[in-house]
């Protein structure tokens, strides 16, 4: 029942939230519900992997062979935990932010959380698709109602991209369903199809799913919706998009693409890997050129997600374990960067790097915390990202799924060097040097803002120093997925 509770708590509470008119009550309600969801997620981690409480199945649409089937394995547990941790962090970090019709805003945020967790725990393809859309629909409204001046254009582009991707994926799901022996949407039934579908069909099926997941991550050249959407969305929504929602695409690759269509994945793996490499270099160079903090962090996210996607196609145990732990690490780190951007913009009214400077003199606590998060973002040893990136690079280099493993490793390494360039350059220009007329009156962050960033820093250090629990959590899942991929 744990996965059911993880979905039901934010889903039902979000529906209740629409009727809460008072802004303070809406904030408190949402924060309380997000903490309750986190408590359930943590409790699920304490249970044995074979516990019946981690699985649930009931009839949903029997005429179509679809069941409400949800389960928590290592990967879904770590992503559900990321989702459960992210929302209270977001609510606390943006607690002082005022929204028009706050009850509706926070209700949509909770509905989005329910959809995200539903995606990560579904083991029925139709149910997976249902939650995929449920996670996205609230974001359309959150961005288009509470976003910036150009929110309509940005949201429209986001809608078109995701709608097309979702439609392609639905076509692929229906095709696979029609070829299952028991006419079922069950994940296990889909896994049994890999030897029954011809190589030609696997080839085009790969692109139906890959494009849908590539848009969501996003991967070059399906990324152009992302910087505009991140820039125009409310920062709380951007945190959800960047910290959690992009993981839907990576999760889809690992759970629903590579093991279900291994022939197509083998055939097009090098092409997909090349797109990842191009996107990483392009996004890193674009980040170096940015003067807007939001767009810099947005392009940084594209580069890091590209590395994770590349490691998925390496199809090695170390690479996949690196991806699973890095999905969690990236989510935590990128949310911390968005919090810093939000704090700077809220206090100074600008996100332009050229208009800032010397903030370390006025906000030393913020500067110290940002430096630690930024060093984690560039994978400094003893930080969480170092563990994930080391495993991913090791997996890419030792991959036997491609003859270009050395080229991919070296080229991906260049993007890591570039990430250090734009992150350290941003720190130097924003926090060091002399203050100016705008930053002269800046103040240090409040205690609750220090506390939430300190919590993230603690997670960065703990996972960086002692990653073994996360690795043990995902080990069984990695073995099962690699067995089903069956590339050789």
Image (cartoon, rainbow, N blue to C red):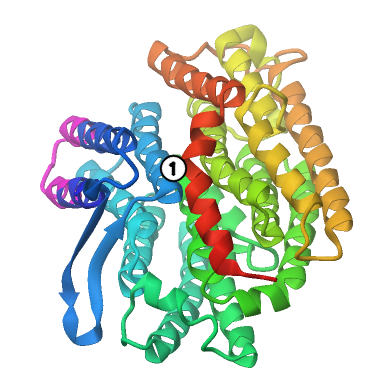
The residue where tag 1 is placed is: 78
At which x and y percent is residue 39? 26, 32
Percent position (x, y) of residue 58? Answer: 16, 66
Q: Is residue 84 magenta?
A: no
Q: Quadrant of the C terminus?
A: bottom right
Q: Magenta-highlighted stretch: main secondary structure? A: helix
Quadrant of residue 428 in the image?
top right
Q: Is 113 placed above or below 377 here?
A: below
Q: Is residue 198 left or right of residue 409?
A: left
Along the line of sight, the residue nearer the viewer: 96 or 192? 192
341 up-or-down from 102: above or below: above
- Residue 175 drawn above or below residue 28: below
Nearest to the observer: residue 229 or residue 130? 130
Q: Residues within 10 Å of mark 1 (few under 14, many from 20)?
A: many
Give whichever of 337, 255 is nearer the camera: 255
Which residue is located at x 72 percent, y 78 percent?
A: 267
Residue at image position (38%, 61%) is 136
Query: Is residue 19 found inside the magenta-colored segment of the image?
Result: yes
**Left or right: 380 as drawn, with respect to 42:** right
Q: Quadrant of residue 184?
A: bottom left
Q: Is there any visible trace of residue 65 in the rendered image?
A: yes
Secondary structure of the residue carrying tag 1 is: helix
Tell me the magenta residue range. Answer: 13-29
Q: Quadrant of residue 190?
A: bottom left
Q: Is residue 345 visible?
A: no
Between 58 and 231, the one lying in front of the other is: 58
Residue positioned 57% across, 32% down in the render: 337
User: Residue 395: horizontal and vertical position, in percent?
Assistant: 73, 49
Which x, y percent locates residue 355? 69, 29
């Amino acid at each position: 029942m744990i996965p059911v509770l993880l979905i039901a708590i934010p889903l039902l509470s979000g529906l209740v939230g629409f009727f809460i008119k008072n802004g303070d009550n809406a904030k408190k309600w949402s924060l309380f519900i997000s903490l309750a969801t986190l408590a359930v997620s943590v409790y699920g981690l304490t249970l044995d992997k074979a516990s019946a409480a981690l699985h649930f199945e009931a009839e949903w649409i029997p005429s179509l062979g679809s069941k409400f089937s949800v389960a928590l394995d290592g990967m879904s547990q770590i992503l559900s935990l990321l989702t459960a941790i992210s929302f209270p962090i977001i609510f606390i970090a943006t607690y002082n932010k005022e929204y028009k019709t706050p009850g509706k805003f926070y209700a949509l945020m909770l509905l989005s959380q329910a959809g995200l967790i539903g995606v990560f725990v579904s083991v029925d393809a139709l149910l997976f698709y249902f939650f995929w859309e449920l996670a996205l629909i609230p974001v359309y409204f959150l961005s288009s109602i509470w976003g910036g001046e150009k929110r309509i254009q940005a949201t429209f582009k986001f809608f078109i991209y995701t709608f097309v991707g979702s439609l392609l994926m639905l076509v692929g799901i229906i095709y696979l369903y029609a070829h299952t022996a028991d006419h079922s949407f069950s994940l296990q039934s889909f896994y049994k199809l890999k030897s029954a579908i011809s190589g030609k069909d696997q080839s085009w099926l790969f692109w139906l799913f890959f494009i849908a997941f590539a848009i969501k991550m996003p991967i070059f050249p399906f990324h152009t919706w992302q910087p505009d959407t991140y820039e125009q969305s409310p920062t709380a929504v951007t945190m959800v998009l960047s910290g959690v929602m992009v993981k839907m695409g990576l999760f889809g690759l690992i759970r629903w693409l590579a093991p279900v269509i291994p022939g197509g994945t083998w055939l097009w793996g090098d092409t997909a890997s090349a797109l990842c490499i191009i996107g990483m270099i392009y996004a890193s160079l674009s980040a170096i050129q940015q003067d807007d903090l939001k767009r810099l962090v947005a392009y940084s996210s594209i580069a890091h997600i590209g590395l994770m996607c590349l490691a998925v196609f390496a199809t090695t145990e170390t690479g996949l374990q690196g991806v699973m732990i890095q999905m969690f690490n990236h989510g935590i780190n990128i949310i911390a960067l968005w919090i810093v951007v939000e704090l700077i913009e809220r206090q100074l009214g600008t996100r332009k790097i050229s208009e800032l400077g010397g903030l370390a003199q006025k906000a030393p606590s913020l500067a110290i915390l940002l430096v630690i998060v930024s060093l984690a973002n560039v994978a400094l040893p003893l930080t969480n990202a170092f563990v994930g990136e080391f495993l991913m690079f090791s997996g890419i280099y030792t991959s036997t799924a491609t003859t270009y493993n050395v080229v991919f490793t070296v080229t991906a390494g260049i993007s890591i060097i570039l990430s250090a360039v734009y992150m350290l350059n941003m720190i130097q220009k924003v926090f060091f040097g002399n203050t100016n007329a705008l930053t002269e009156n800046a103040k240090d962050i409040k205690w609750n803002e220090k506390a939430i960033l300190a919590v993230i820093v603690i997670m960065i250090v703990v996972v960086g120093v002692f990653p073994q629990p996360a690795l043990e959590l995902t080990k069984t899942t990695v073995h099962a997925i690699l067995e089903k991929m069956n590339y050789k």
